[in-house]
Image: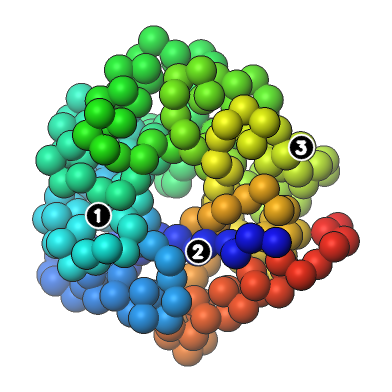
Amino acid sequence: MKPLRLGVNIDHVATVRNARGGAHPDPLDAAMAAVRAGADGITLHLREDRRHIRDEDVRRIRAALGPVPMNLEMAATAEMTAIARAVRPHACCLVPERREEVTTEGGLDAAGQTDALRPVVAALRDAGIRVSLFIDPDPAQLRAAAALGAPVVELHTGAYADGRPGEFERLREAAALAPTLGLECHAGHGLSFGNVVPVAALPEIAELNIGHFLIGEAIVDGGLGAAVRRMKALMRGARGITRTV
């Protein structure tokens, strides 16, 4: 079975920093610590309201990572498209965004927003940026992503992480459908040490993006490096599992 990549989201290091308005802790330091511990890439979300990651964070982390992939999560707006085209991250993941939400609450409606998304996907691809769409594990959304020309989908695992009945089966079926549509399949949101193994064992999934849980573990139990190493070990072990749930 193919290796599974881990992208570590460092947004909430910036949340802690911004609570005091200073420069510490620096999300750049967290990004480099995650890479040293085995992270395969770094994810960060530049929100319209700049509630955690700031523009200068994006530029500094992009420069510091060098060849290590940076995945910029962003709303499909003209402002964010211009920033992405200037910074040139390895990848951009288009996500839904509402000012009043605490965190991303569901997947992007690619099927219902085709006209708005098409020029954004094209502009990012023209800049040499790998585009992914953060969507619910729904066949209509996967087909819409493929029609838009996005080479990657990231399946929203929040409902699965909340323990809703039937959600793992939805993830399994969506992951199996993705490669038949020419899509690389990623997954993320709400994943933890306790629930990651079944998702990581799905052979079609190439990458998991995990942030809030890892940052929380870093605070209470041994630091970010230890949390990343344990998550990677669980992911590697899952790739040898034949029975998922």
Identify the residue shown where x is 27% and y is 63%: 67
Identify the residue shown where x is 22% and y is 34%: 127
Camera-side residue: 25 or 157? 157
The x and y percentages for residue 186 are 55, 47
The x and y percentages for residue 133 are 46, 34
Q: Which quadrant would the N terminus be assigned to in this image?
A: bottom right
Disc number lying in front (3 or 1): 3
Disc number lying in front (2 or 1): 2
The answer to whether residue 15 shows anywhere in this view is: yes
Contact between marks 2 and 1 (CB within 8 A): the answer is no
Q: Within 10 angstroms of label 3, few (less than 14), some, or many (20 or more) residues?
A: some
Q: Is residue 88 left or right of residue 114?
A: left
Q: Amino acid at mark 2?
A: Leu
Q: Within 10 angstroms of label 1, few (less than 14), some, or many (20 or more) residues?
A: many
Q: Amino acid at mark 1?
A: Ile
What kind of element bears circle 2?
strand
The x and y percentages for residue 36 are 36, 81
Camera-side residue: 210 or 18? 210
Residue assigned mark 1 = 53
Q: Is residue 70 above or below residue 231?
A: above
Measured in 3D between alpha carbons, the distance from the residue under mark 3 to the one under mark 1, in whole angstroms, is 34 Å
Q: Point out the tag, 3 or 1, that comes first from the N-terminus.
A: 1
Measured in 3D between alpha carbons, the distance from the residue under mark 2 to the one under mark 3, in whole angstroms, is 21 Å
Residue assigned mark 3 = 173
Residue assigned mark 2 = 6
